[in-house]
Image (tube, grey):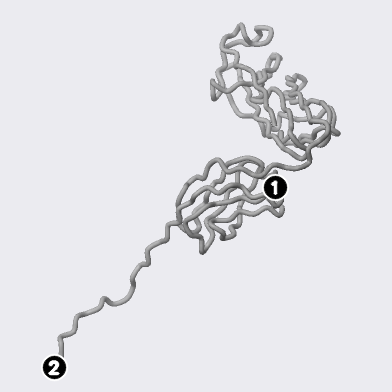
């Protein structure tokens, strides 16, 4: 997978057509983006991703969309009701209502992102390419972070990484060999409580029969709380 990005415009003159009424800094000023043309009364929109080049069919990439408003406010609008997504060639790639792009078959196309307000709208286009011949073998999942890295049974742990798949399906998560039951699942993040019986060791994610390398998690057992009457010393009897 290759995701191409471009630098952020940092002055009014760098915005398309110089039509921005004020400099609108994004939430992360170091994040590159694809920038829209600005239509009056509609915010400028940009996408972190400029170009997507997939490695294999079935691979998924989520788009991240932001909007800059005339008062300087910047908001994430990836899931906004004003935003719609469409694919120019669904034989190459599809995109759902949340901006998740999925590779289908070899070729080129683009994803159109539209921010519509009344009769006005702004659009950006994200080029998409899938290799020919298509590699159908998905790579193994990779864990990049556990948060927190320790906890007792029931503690919610967020596993971040890549190639987890859009939904769990038959994929699994284990804590040092003990199976866990995730509460949420996406291509790059899994939320899962520490299972009963878990011990200190590696957390692993298995997708399509491919297991990730493990990442160490420290299991913290809760100390038992003593209840009942304290023991009393009895005098020795001869």
Residue labelled with disc 1: 167
Quarter location, residue 111: top right
Query: In front here: 115 or 49?
Result: 49
The mark found on residue 238 in the picture is 2
Counting other residues with Cα less than 10 Å from the Cα at mark 1, is it few (<14), some (14-19), or many (20 or more)? few
Q: Identify the residue at image location x=59%, y=8%.
A: 12
* Camera-nearest label, 2 or 1: 2
Q: Is residue 83 left or right of residue 160?
A: right
Q: Is residue 178 left or right of residue 107?
A: left
Query: In front here: 145 or 67?
Result: 145
Query: In front here: 39 or 131?
Result: 131
Quadrant of the image for the N terminus?
top right
Residue 84: image x %, image y %?
Answer: 75, 30
Counting other residues with Cα less than 10 Å from the Cα at mark 2, is it few (<14), some (14-19), or many (20 or more)? few
Residue 25: image x %, image y %?
Answer: 55, 18
For this orientation, the residue located farthest to the left is: 238
Quadrant of the image for the C terminus?
bottom left
Say which label, 2 or 1, has the lower sequence index. Answer: 1
Query: In front here: 69 or 186?
Result: 186
Give the vertical position of 110 relative to 206 (above or below): above
Q: Identify the residue at image location x=61%, y=19%.
A: 69
Q: For the residues marked 2 and 1, what is the alpha-carbon distance in whole angstroms?
A: 73 Å
Number of numbered labels in the structure image: 2
Query: In terms of secondary structure, where does tag 1 sit?
Result: loop
Residue 5: image x %, image y %?
Answer: 65, 21
């Amino acid at each position: 997978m290759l995701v191409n990005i471009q630098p952020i415009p940092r002055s009014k003159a760098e915005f398309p057509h110089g039509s921005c009424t004020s400099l609108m800094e994004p939430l992360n000023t170091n994040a590159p983006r694809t920038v829209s043309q600005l239509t009056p009364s509609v915010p400028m929109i940009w996408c972190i991703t400029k170009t997507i080049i997939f490695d294999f069919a079935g691979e998924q990439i989520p788009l991240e969309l932001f909007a800059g408003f005339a008062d300087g406010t910047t908001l994430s609008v990836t899931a906004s009701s004003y935003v719609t997504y469409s694919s120019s060639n669904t034989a190459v790639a599809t995109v759902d209502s949340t901006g998740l792009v999925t590779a289908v078959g070899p070729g080129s196309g683009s994803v159109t992102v539209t921010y519509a307000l009344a009769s006005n709208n702004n659009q950006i286009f994200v080029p998409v390419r899938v290799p020919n011949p298509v590699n159908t073998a998905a790579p193994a999942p990779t864990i990049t972070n556990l948060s927190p890295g320790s906890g007792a049974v029931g503690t919610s742990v967020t596993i971040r990484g890549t190639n987890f798949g859009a939904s769990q399906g038959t994929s699994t998560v284990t804590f040092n060999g003990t199976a866990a039951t995730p509460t949420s699942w996406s291509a790059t993040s899994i939320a899962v409580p520490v299972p009963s019986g878990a011990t200190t060791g590696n957390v692993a994610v298995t997708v399509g029969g491919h297991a990730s390398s493990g990442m160490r998690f420290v299991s913290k057992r809760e100390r038992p709380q003593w209840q009942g009457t304290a023991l009393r010393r009895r005098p020795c009897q001869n």
